Amino acid sequence: MHVDLLIKNAAQLITCASPGKPKRGTAMKDVGLITNGAIAITDGQIVALSTTDELKAYTARETIDAANKVVCPGFVDCHTHIAFGGNRLDEFEMRIQGATYMEIMNAGGGIMSTVRATRAASKQQLIDEAAARLDIMLALGTTTVEVKTGYGLDTATELKLLQVIEALASIRTLDIVPTFLGAHAVPAEYKDRADAYLDLVSQEMLPTVKDWYTASLFAERNIPLFADVFCEANVFDREQSRRVLQVAKDYGMGIKAHVDEFKSLNGVTMALELGTISVDHLDVTGMDEITALASSDTIAVPLPAVNFNLGSTHFANARAMLDSGAALALATDMNPGSAPCYSMPFIMAIASRYQRLTPAEALNASTINAAHAIGLGDRIGSLEVGKQADVLIINAPDYREIVYEFGGNRVEQVIKKGQIVL
Ligand code: NIG
Ligand code: FE
């Protein structure tokens, strides 16, 4: 059998395989390890996967010898805000001196300062800066990235951000998944009029976004569109969040929610009632809602870079989520304020130490389960026959190194859709 690309002799081939559904419970402790593994790839897809010995009849146009190396799925970053202008370096210094994230936001900084910079930036400038961010992520092993809007907060700038995200998908090899986050904050023009702003989001932005998506390359590539909301004290309360997500759902969009980052408004209960694909942050979620989450199809997505970046020692109770049987994924939340973090391995490093995930759990959460959190679990996130060939060659013989070390980068080669892109 002749194929395009053959990867062989891998010390550990890590598949993260989980046919058709995210992993939970004991399956999270299993990374699907094949010793001395090999993968055969043709037309961007995995056509065979087993031990090197089993695949010895295969010949290939190109062969990678992965002796002493780990071969694993590309990382999936299922929650980011990489399309933004400006920076928040002054606020970083304010926080070091004791100001809190929410104090800065309530004083008109935070998300709103990035909104001002993003409105002022040209589309090309935003594309160039976000593309540079994607390049850093790819070098760290991320092959699929969800990207949210949310720094426009007016119809024109939110649309500009969607066009930026679409441009990224056409100029970069990574898969990009768009999420509309018009309900990220109440813009200054609508101060103390959150409901009026949500009218604009529901009546003007969401239909505009829907039309944009229908004609976009995402629809053409069969990549889903999501809508999201920041359900938080002093931002959007639970019923406001429900309202905007319900409208998005009625427009046929997938839905997600930022909940319980600082204060619980029982947003998880609301999100489960609506059937969101994921609930993200979950820092202050209580046991009742964790139990409800565990018996639902909604993916729990803690974002531990936020806690780390804000200098907190409190983290989402990811251990309880896993032990209750929830499907758990991890992401960077890359953004200029709460989480200027590019690296999925660094997220796994934090989650293992502060949230007691084993390396296997952290890796499954960053691959197959993260793929399910953006509706792509049938195509990416694991190494299985028929799936897209998004594969990493890691310069270490044991997959646990990915999670154990931090601050470096063991990603040696990145294969995206069967092409060696790095
Ligand atoms: O996920 N929580 C709301 N949104 C982002 C932060 C955005 C920002 O600070 O610019 C988050 O943490
Ligand atoms: Fe976020």
Image: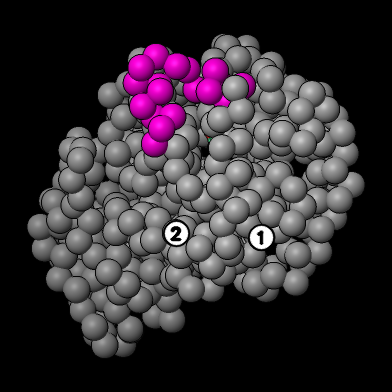
Relative side of 242 to 272, left or right: right
Q: Of the two numbered discs 1 and 2 on the same chain, state the one appearing first in sequence.
A: 2
* Residue 233: percent from left, percent from top: 67, 18
- The answer for how far apart the CA atoms under marks 1 and 2 are is 14 Å
Which residue does the numbered mark 2 point to in the structure image?
129
Pointer 1: what residue?
160
In the picture provided, is 307 more to the left or to the right than 350?
right
For label 2, being within 8 Å of ligand 1 is answered: no
Q: Is residue 312 above or below residue 340?
A: above
Relative to 91, residue 407 above or below: below
Q: In the image, what residue occupies the spot 60% across and 53% down?
A: 120
Residue 210 image position (x, y, % from top left): 79, 59
- Who is closer to the viewer here, 120 or 38? 120
Q: Is residue 130 visible?
A: yes
Q: Main secondary structure of the magenta part?
A: helix
Q: Would you say residue 102 sits in the magenta stretch?
A: yes
Q: Quadrant of residue 389?
A: bottom left
Task: Give x and y (percent) for residue 122.
Answer: 58, 62
Q: Residue at x 56, y 30 (%)?
A: 109
Q: In this picture, is 74 found above or below 345?
A: below
Say the numbered circle drawn on residue 12: none
Task: Look at 66% across and 48% down and name the residue there.
Answer: 152
Q: Taking 218 as reference, is 351 above or below it?
A: above
The quadrant of the rendering that contains the C terminus is bottom left
Q: Amino acid at mark 2?
A: Glu
Judge whether residue 80 is colored magenta. Answer: no
Q: Residues within 10 Å of mark 2 (few under 14, many from 20)?
A: some
Kind of residue at badge 1: Lys
Question: Please, which colouring scheme is shown?
Answer: one colour
